[in-house]
Image: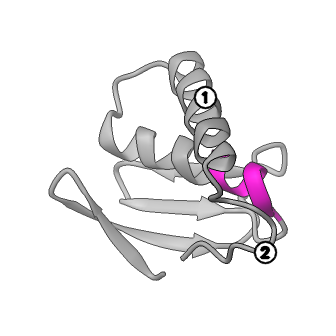
Amino acid sequence: MKSHVFRGKRFKIFLRNPQNRNHLGTCDYKKREIEIKPSLEGEEKLDCMIHEALHACFPDIDDAAVDESATSIAKFLTRAGYGRRDDNAK
C-alpha cells in the first residue's frame, strides 16, 4: 500500500521505522504521511494502523482517545479473524 484517502485527503503510507524510535507509528497530518514500523505483526500491527488512520481522519482528537479506540477496534477485528499473524493485511 503506497497511499490511502482518509476523509478526502490522500496520505502516503510508509512501512519504515518512525524517526521517533519510541513510536510504533506516526501520522503527520500536514505532510499527509503515515509511518508504520515494519516489524509489527498481527494485532499489534492492526492496532497501530487503526491508530494512525484515526489520527488521519480526526486530527483534533487527543491521543488518549485515539489510543483507546484503536486498541478496542483492533481487539474486535482480531476476535473476528482479522490481523492475525497469517493474515497479510494490505
Quadrant the C terminus occupies: bottom right
Q: Quadrant of residue 55?
A: top left
Mark 2 Cα-neighbour bin, 10 Å: few <14, some 14–19, many ≥20: few
Q: Choose mark 2 or mark 1, whichever is in front.
A: 2
User: Of label 2 and label 1, which has the lower sequence position?
Assistant: 1
Q: Find residue 72 and name its label.
A: 1
Vertical relation: 53 (above or below) 35: above
Residue 51 belongs to the span the image colors magenta: no
At a point 74% along the width and 63% down the height, the residue shown is 37
Instruction: Answer left or right for 78 relative to 12.
Output: right
Q: Amino acid at mark 2?
A: Asp
Q: Magenta stretch: give its range.
A: 40-47
Give the residue type at disc 1: Ser
Residue that carries the numbered disc 2 in the rendered image: 86
Residue 23 in the image: x percent, y percent?
76, 45
Is 27 in front, or is 90? 90
Give the x, y percent position of residue 48.
65, 48
The image shows residue 63 at horizontal and vertical percentages of 55, 23
Up-down relation of residue 89 to residue 57 (above or below): below
Question: Residue shown at 32%/33% (left/top)?
Answer: 58
